[in-house]
Image (tube, rainbow, N blue to C red):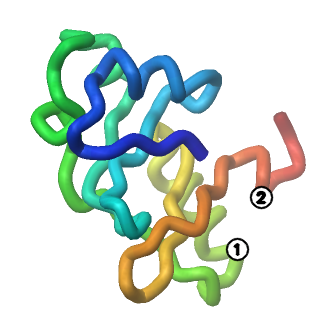
Amino acid sequence: MPTCSPDDTVGAAAGRAGDWALCVVVDDGGIVLGLLRGEDLGGDPGRRAEEAMHEGPSTFRPDVPVEEMAGHLRDHPKLGQVLVTTSGGRLLGAIRPADVTGQG
């Protein structure tokens, strides 16, 4: 799961994104602040991540059943993944459709 700090540039975040086509913006403690999506990562490479990110992305807790996450991904096919965080907002990882369907 690629991450970057709010002070990183979009260009640096894009370099970390790889095949994820996203980068999660986190603070020094790993708390999710926002998300840079594919279109954001293709923007001005000198722009700060904090300026380009989408704030407050939806997240799931690790105790949510996988079936519920899979349903959310089915209902929102453009998402591509759901973020999993602690109740305090610290990033634990992400679930992609292939992780819950066995395809991909």
Quadrant hosting residue 92: bottom right
Q: Which residue is mark 1?
A: 67
Image quadrant in which the C terminus is located: top right
Question: Mark 1 is on which residue type?
Answer: Glu
Q: What residue is drawn where x is 40% and y is 41%?
A: 4
User: Within 10 angstroms of label 1, few (less than 14), some, or many (20 or more) residues?
Assistant: few
Question: Mark 2 is on which residue type?
Answer: Val
Above/below status of 100 relative to 20: below
How far apart are the alpha carbons under marks 2 and 1?
A: 8 Å
Q: What residue is drawn where x is 17% and y is 32%?
A: 52
Q: Is residue 92 left or right of residue 3?
A: right
Above/below status of 99 relative to 16: below
Earlier-in-chain disc, 2 versus 1: 1
Residue in the foreground of this view, choosing between 95 and 4: 4
Question: Which residue, as the protein is rendered here, is positioned at the far right?
Answer: 102
State if disc 1 and disc 2 touch (CB < 8 Å).
yes
Q: Is residue 24 left or right of residue 44?
A: right
Residue 35, percent from left and from top: 33, 45
Above/below status of 80 relative to 10: below
Quadrant hosting residue 27: bottom left
Q: What residue is drawn where x is 58% and y is 53%?
A: 74
User: Within 10 angstroms of label 2, few (less than 14), some, or many (20 or more) residues?
Assistant: some
Q: Which residue is mark 2?
A: 100
